[in-house]
Amino acid sequence: MISGRLSLEHLYHILSSNDWSEESTVDYLPQSFDEEGFIHLSTKQQLLDTANRHFRQERSLRVLEVNPKGLENNLVFEQIGEAIEAYPHLYQSLPQKNIVQCFVLENSSQGFVDTRS
């Protein structure tokens, strides 16, 4: 189902504040999954733009870094609405084994920035 991607880098999911616990042992599904049927993801190149466009009012965000290996059959890059580029959508729950890490993006006067090394 992955179109236009020969090798897949890590993907990112921006969390609502209480959507995920690091102690969780079950697969992850955001609250929006029941309504939308997929998990919104971003590539590394899309992450900050997505955060600044959709979450500008938040002071900080938690982000899951996702290894897409093994998810390819349910991962689709799609253009939604008037979007110019395609965004990855995962049409299944996110297995804990695919979550590489959870990190925080802080909002500054310039918007969200990734301060990780």
Image (cartoon, rainbow, N blue to C red):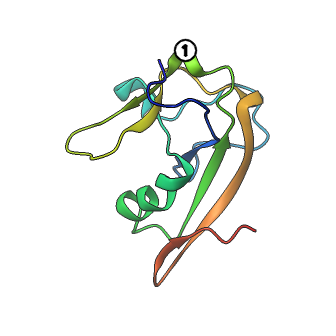
Which corner quadrant of the image does residue 35 belong to?
top left
Indicate whether 72 appears above or below 80: above
Location of the C terminus (image quadrant): bottom right
Q: Residue 26 appears at what percent x and percent y?
A: 71, 25
Going by the numbered disc 1, the residue's amino acid type is: Asn
Which corner quadrant of the image does residue 22 belong to?
top right
Q: Residue furthest bottom?
A: 109
- As helix, strand or loop, the secondary structure at mark 1 comes to helix
Work out whether residue 73 or residue 97 is closer to the camera in this orientation and state it: 73
Q: Residue 96 appears at what percent x and percent y?
A: 73, 30
* Residue 7 falls left or right of residue 52: right
In the image, what residue occupies the spot 42% across and 34% down? 32
Work out whether residue 51 or residue 34 is closer to the camera in this orientation and state it: 51
Q: Residue 53 appears at what percent x and percent y?
A: 35, 61
Label 1 neighbour load within 10 Å: few <14, some 14-19, many 20+? few
In the image, what residue occupies the spot 46% across and 84% down? 109
In the image, what residue occupies the spot 41% across and 65% down? 52
Indicate whether 74 appears above or below 64: above
In the image, what residue occupies the spot 46% across and 35% down? 88
Q: Residue furthest left?
A: 82
Report the residue marked by disc 1. 73
Q: Residue 58 appears at what percent x and percent y?
A: 46, 67
